[in-house]
Image (cartoon, grey):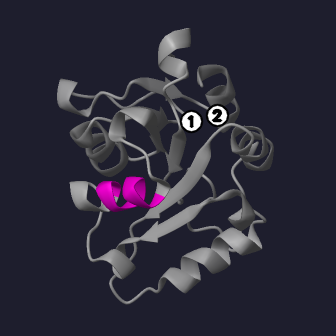
Amino acid sequence: MYSGSVRNLIKAIVFDLGNTLVRENSPTIEKMPHAVNVLAELRKKYKLAVISNVLPTTSGDKIREILLGAGLLDYFDEVVVSSEVGFSKPAEQIFKITLEKLNVKPEEAVMVGNIVSTDIFGGNGIGMKTVLLQETREYQRSSWEKPTHTIQSLEELLKLV
């Protein structure tokens, strides 16, 4: 993904929640494959955060409860929830708020998500590197939506950063 000199510039990795770290619409909290191992490895070198869009009536506590139930909450330095900050992805403000909390610049961060129109477009829009987690490679993207890289499993992320 990055040459040695660029890799050294990466200080933080930001994740979407649903269908990136945990399965959406699962009757129980189900982690995505390899989530724990990947986060444990990344945590050794990078600051980690979650950005989650939720309905205006959903609290950030619910998102933290999901992360806790999946055994993932402790891996994250920050959890930024749209209902708490007043902005939803792809608005640049939610990304800026997250990066400010992590004390990193956009070019020092990677956004990992599964939705092109929110995660990738938003990350690209403020100058982050972007990684699309796409379990099947069926979606065709226009140039403005193009992620820096596409992976089919979270485990592949370890080879990129």
Residue 97 included in the magenta stretch of the image: yes
Towards the viewer: 125 or 69: 125
Q: Residue at x 55, y 22 (%)?
A: 8
Say few, some or many: other residues with alpha carbon within 10 Å of mark 1 (under 14 / 14 to 19 / 20 or more).
some
Circle 1: element type: loop
Highlighted range, magenta = 95-101
Towards the viewer: 115 or 84: 84
Residue 7 included in the magenta stretch of the image: no
> Could you say which quadrant of the image residue 34 lies in?
top right
Towards the viewer: 130 or 109: 109
Relative to 136, say whether 38 is above or below.
below
Residue bearing mark 2: 153
Q: Residue at x 50, y 48 (%)?
A: 14
Point out the residue furthest to the bottom here. 57
Instruction: Say if residue 77 shows up in the picture.
Output: yes
Foreground: disc 2 or disc 1: 2
| Image side of residue 71 versus residue 66, left or right | right
| Image side of residue 95 versus residue 153, left or right | left
Residue bearing mark 1: 135
Instruction: Say if residue 30 shows up in the picture.
Output: no
Mark seen at residue 44: none
Secondary structure character of the magenta stretch overall: helix
Specify the quadrant that holds the C terminus: top right
> Could you say which quadrant of the image residue 63 lies in?
bottom right
- Earlier along the polypeptide chain: callout 2 or callout 1? 1
Towards the viewer: 100 or 60: 100
| Image side of residue 35 versus residue 111, left or right | right
Residue 36: x percent and y percent?
78, 50
Residue type for callout 1: Glu
Please report contact status of discs 2 and 1: CB closer than 8 Å, yes or no: yes
Residue type for callout 2: Ser
